[in-house]
Image (tube, helix red, strand yellow):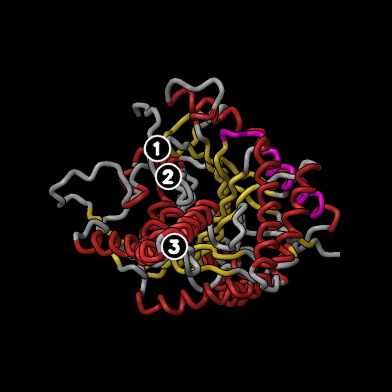
Amino acid sequence: MALTFGRLRQARGRSPINGWSGTQVVIVGVVVMLGMLTAQIWLVGGLVFAAIALPTLLVCVIPFGAAKRTLGGRFLWWLRGWRAHATEADQYAAGPLTTVERGEDLPGVAAPLMPLDVEDGRGGRQLLMWNRATGIVSARLRVAPVGLALADESDGTTWVNSFASFEADLGYKPFIEWVSYDIESSPTGGVNQREYTLERIAPDAPEVCKQILTELVPRNGASTADVSTSVTLHFNPAKFSPAPKDLSEVATEVVRWLPGIESALASSGAAVLGRATTPWAIRRTRAQYDPGMRGEMLAHQYDDDTAEEISWRDAGPIRTGGTEHVYRTDSGYHISWVLEAPPRGTFTAAVLLPLLAPGRYYRRVSMHYQPYPAGETADLLEHEVTGGQLRQWWAKATKRDETQRERDDRSKAQADTRDESFGAGVGRWTAYITTSVIDPNLLDAAAADVEDRVAAAKMRFRRATGSQGAMFAVSQGWGIDPTQALTRSTDRWDS
């Protein structure tokens, strides 16, 4: 029997009205009560109050649309984007001919990222990515998931249970802000494999073997792809106990926790190939910004002997730009999407295969999991249950029939509360997708390919209109989370 999953739901809080926050409900309720009291005392005053309050609520308080933003919020969003484009603040240029020193920054929201080359505790070196704006330090592990397609059912069940335990245990590690699962696929790997195979046919091999390989590899080699999977842990040094005094102590704490995490991932069916090194990250990042150089950049991605030949300065693009719908970097044109809704109902472990399977175009999928602290999950789930009951009461009070989706949502919240009492972990999932092409004429085809795969995966994504550059950086999986503040007024360390 295939493993099935489900009960994913969007956090709604205790608001009785879907899409509204508790603060918005309180503000509207207070304004309505004040208007009624004013009208009872002085009718003309009540009319004046209503003429002022209603437009204000519509502009500043009441949300609408899929984004659940107010009219004023939408206007400010558009105004910021227009101002950035008009002043070319969203453009980036670097290189030997620029009059301003480039420094070692990436463009946009990725500018604060800085690599730290540290000892891995095993006699080697590894990379830690430091976000200088938020203080987040990220450690990336290169993994090779075994997969459930050809696995024994008992092994698959064991891996899934181990993975659930791994994520539940993250709730007891408050210093881990979130975890990123990043999958990159590109069709360029087939050419390398074809050449690799044909060049290694032994001269003294039997003729029949030579003939089979010579005919088989050119036919099937182009259908292969370069696929890489990684898991990135994002640590918040401010939550370490005792608090570290400098970056050296931060690195020591982060490296100390990695062996246990590697063991947990291995028990979950994801063999750890190694930890990301600085040359590996530089080459990968450069290939993402400049897909035309992808083959050259990744040809020696595991060769750390060339570390002195490249630096973090080489990771970023020479120039960026684009429109609100497309992000442009060097030889690449990129489109990004943001998760809007997960699969509904019950689904199998193969639900993501259409989205993650390689295709004709480069695609990067980054799934982020933010664990809630174990000490807070009970209260959070109780708020969700209370919110479901309030929404049920509101439907009756407004004489509106409750939808089946609302009833299912309330049942899921109650079931989640029951599972949490037995030790289940609770967290927040989101995902980002980026596709890249070299030829702008292929953008529509690449975007259609992604959207077809999203539909096959029973998920809903929306294009990151107006924030393509930011979502490109977020989908790289390095210490940038748009659901949190991109800067924090915390102590900084000298690099």
Q: Is residue 394 magenta?
A: no
Work out which quarter of the rendered image holds the N terminus and state it: bottom right
Q: Residues within 10 Å of mark 3 (few under 14, many from 20)?
A: some
Q: Which residue is found at the position 40% from the left and 47% from the top? A: 282
Could you tell me if the residues under marks 1 and 2 are in contact, i.e. CB atoms within 8 Å? yes
Residue nearest the observer in this picture, 215 or 456: 456
Q: Is residue 78 left or right of residue 197?
A: left
Mark 3 or 1, closer to the camera:
3
What residue would you read off at disc 2? 485
Q: Position of residue 456 (x, y in %)?
A: 63, 74
Q: Which mark is residue 340?
A: none
Q: Position of residue 173 (x, y in %)?
A: 63, 34
Q: Is residue 157 magenta?
A: yes
What residue would you read off at disc 3? 39
Could you tell me if the residues under marks 2 and 3 are in contact, i.e. CB atoms within 8 Å? no
Can you tell which quarter of the image residue 81 is in?
bottom left
What residue would you read off at disc 1? 488
Q: Give me the C-alpha separation between circle 2 and circle 3.
A: 42 Å
Q: Main secondary structure of the magenta part?
A: helix
Q: Which residue is found at the position 15% from the left and 52% from the top? A: 97
Work out which quarter of the rendered image holds the C terminus and state it: top left
Q: Is residue 302 left or right of residue 317?
A: right
Label 2 vs 3, first from the N-terminus = 3
Q: Please state the extent of the stretch shown in magenta in the rendering.
A: 156-175
From this viewpoint, is residue 74 visible? no
